[in-house]
Amino acid sequence: MDFLMNYKSWCDAGLPAEINKELFDLRNNDEELKSRFGSELQFGTAGMRGVMGVGSNRLNKYTVRRAAQGMAAWLSSADLPQKAAIGYDSRHNSELFAQVCAVAFAEAGIEVWLYDRLAPTPMLSYAVRELKCGCGIVISASHNSGEYNGVKCYGPDGCQMTDEPAAIVTEQINKIPYFVPERKSFQEFVENGAIHYIGQEIWESYYNTVLAESINPDLIRPANLNVVYTPLCGTGNEPVREILGRLGVNLTVVPCQEKPDGDFKTCEYPNPETDAALRESYKIADNMLCDFVFGTDPDADRVAVAVPFGVKEYRKLTGNELGCLLMDYILKARKEKDDIPEGSIVVRSIVSSPLADKIAESYDVTMRAVLTGFKYIGGEILNLENKGEEYKFLFGFEESCGYLKGTYARDKDAIVASMLICEYAAWLKMQGKSIMHALDEMYATYGYYLAKVQSVELTGADAMEKAAKMMADLRSNTPKSIGGIAVTVVRDYRSSVATDIVNGTEETILLPKSNVLEFVLGSSGSVIVRPSGTEPKVKFYYTAIAKDYPAAKELVQAMMDQMSK
């Protein structure tokens, strides 16, 4: 794409004055012009995500409208309900972009249901199913910093889109010009009944559904839990407080991160996977008797926990650790009630800790490992649902702090996870234990599994090409050892081949093809490499297995040092 010609087409499009000013200010900055106009934002199964601003490679009213028109064209041609649900988070322009999407659907004759206020991503997944819609959209960039926003797209089952419909949407988007004017305003479509608001009845239905996923809710009040919570200036504030308030949790909310704030001034990178995101929570917890601290990301599909560890010190659990602890609690509690159906499954992503497999095995429950992306966990639920056996799904999680119990939604849900964390902490407290005690006991039982994630962010107009080259180099120059440990198996999920280096044999990987490489280091761990589907970055997932933390830490550091070179 010729970035100067593309830039000129935007300048000549007769856009509003504020857009023209932004275009004018860019006129002598070739590097910025190439970044903004040298390519287009790519639509994929996760939808579309990018930095907000003017240009074809930025998220703005025009790129969002075009994506929504592509979605509407796909839905109009599909044998699906001609209804769409839309939600949005607390980021800048989220409500505007949601309205832009609503208008694009309404223009195509599709009935639109739009949340009446900020709502978490899992509530959008729930609404798609509850309202029997053909698709859904939530405007959010999840845990990215404030300059980002995104369009997450969902199919009729409440899962993020799969490859086939996403490819059709992409094909439709490529046919659509950028600056097709709206036929009517958003307000006009609301007034003529083409766009409806999702009101309190759906909120209440969702709350009751989440509460039904509790196992021992009556333990919470007697345990007298004292908890510090941060919604990180996002959508979790209302539903988390509502659910935990009904259950009797003594909840202290971090004041400076309570209200919506698209700038995320007190948490520049609002990702609960990072310790920095909970820093303000620690300040509050320092001055009270606190059982644990937790936070949800801006669209409330992820949650992280930190526990007191020494004097004014906190140990933040990784997503793997919390996922394994919650899974162990759910399985133990259901086993005590003789409530684990025969043939039950738990599900994790392939980049999540294999420690979960050991825990599942101890309860005689099948573990399914799926590709990264919660839609694949949702796909396992759908497979059961098609057989009338969805009740056999007990729990699913991803190492990136995403968890789901129940089948009411098909995306990770920080609301139900927050409830389960409180219930688990209460159950432990009634035994005189803490979450930290439980973590130590888990490692003492199964061995120490240390996981680290390294994210390599790439820049420039050719950033996605750089990511592709990194993967190609790893395929052509497969390491023979990592961190001093021999590579025993190489799994290439793109070719669907697992090669046993020791025996020289090959097996077929029975998962959808994906641009992922896994290097297995015998019984000592693994390194998994995958590029992001929505951003120019490559992620390295390290797992070190050892008898204790010092040994695991030494191994994982050696692995990271070698791969970093």
Image (spheres, rainbow, N blue to C red):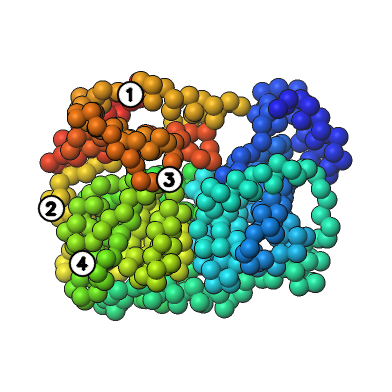
Instruction: Specify which label sits upstream in the sequence, 2 or 3.
Output: 2
Residue 512 circle label: 3
Within-10-Å neighbours for mark 1: few <14, some 14–19, many 20+: few
Q: N-terminal of the two: label 2 or label 4?
A: 4
Tell me where residue 563 sits by quadrant.
top left
Say which element carries label 4.
helix
Q: Does residue 59 lie above or below 231 as drawn? A: above
What amino acid type is highlighted by mark number 4?
Lys
Tell me the quarter of the image containing the C terminus: top left
> Foreground mark, 2 or 3?
3
Tag 2: amino acid: Thr
The label on residue 48 is: none
Residue denoted by label 1: 478
Residue appearing at x 49%, y 48% in the figure: 143
Q: Alpha carbon of mark 2 to alpha carbon of mark 3: how far? A: 34 Å
C-alpha distance separating marks 2 and 1: 34 Å
- Residue at 69% x, 71% y is 196
> Residue 445, labelled with which disc?
2
Place of residue 126 in the rendered image (x, y in percent of width and height, measured from the top left):
51, 67
Give the CA distance from mark 3 to mark 4: 32 Å
Front-most of 339 and 543? 339
Give the residue type that dot 1 points to: Thr
Q: Are marks 3 and 1 in contact (CB under 8 Å)?
A: no
Label at residue 332:
4
Which callout, 4 or 1, points at the residue further toward the start of the chain?
Answer: 4
Question: Dot 2: what SS?
Answer: helix
CA distance for labels 2 and 4? 15 Å
The answer to whether residue 493 is visible is: yes
Q: Amino acid at mark 3?
A: Pro
Earlier-in-chain disc, 2 versus 1: 2
Looking at the picture, tell me which residue is in the foreground, 356 or 97.
356
